[in-house]
Image (cartoon, rainbow, N blue to C red):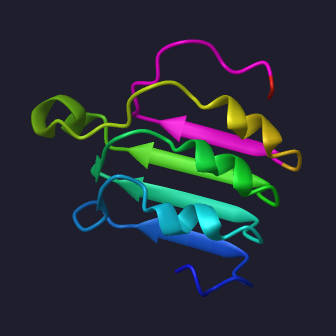
Amino acid sequence: LSRMTNLRQLYLYHPMYLTGTIPSSIYNLTNLLSLTLSSDFLSGTIGTEIGNMRSLTSLNIAINAANVDALGANLVGTLPTEIGRLIYLERLMIMGAFLPGTIPVEL
């Protein structure tokens, strides 16, 4: 993924095969306008490197909430303040994740 520097849209959707943490190589796609990650098995945190993706206008992360308790898959932690660097962000959708705390004032 890190070699695809001109990529504008990335949709990764597969409930069974998109597993684990968000790959760090995604955060290097600095020309990306739209990112959608949808899976039953995403876990870990949203990395602070999200702030490097300054061209993003749309960020969508969805986890099947039915599997959060049953499978232990879930994004955790807080929404990183670095998300405030996404000055072109028009749409932010995070579903099925347990991200306690407040929405960063940087947004």
Question: In which quadrant of the rendered image does the C terminus lie?
Answer: top right
Query: Camera-side residue: 76 or 63?
Result: 76
Q: Is residue 105 left or right of residue 95?
A: right
Q: How many marks?
A: 0
Q: Is residue 35 left or right of residue 24?
A: right
* Residue in the image at 37% along x and 44% along y: 63
Task: From the image, give the main secondary structure of the stretch colored magenta.
Answer: loop
- Residue 96 colored in magenta in the image: yes
Question: Foreground: 46 or 90?
Answer: 46
From the viewer's perspective, is residue 14 above or below residue 48?
below
Closest to the observer, 18 or 22: 22
The relative height of residue 83 versus residue 54 in the rendered view (above or below) is: above
Residue 3 lies in the magenta-colored region = no
Furthest residue in direction right, as rendered? 87
Q: Quadrant of residue 97?
A: top left
Q: Is residue 101 above or below residue 47?
A: above
Q: Position of residue 82 (x, y in %)?
A: 70, 37
Q: Position of residue 22 (x, y in %)?
A: 42, 55
Specify start and end residues of the magenta stretch as a single range.
Answer: 89-105
Question: Depth check: 49 or 70 in front?
Answer: 49
Q: Residue at x 13, y 40 (%)?
A: 71
Residue that protrudes farthest toward the left in the picture: 70
- Residue 21 image position (x, y, % from top left): 35, 52
Q: Residue at x 81, y 26 (%)?
A: 106
Q: Whole-percent x and y of residue 87?
A: 88, 45
3 vs 70, left or right, is right
Query: Going 55% across and 66% down the picture, which residue do you hit?
Result: 26
Give the left or right position of residue 104, taking residue 49 as reference: right
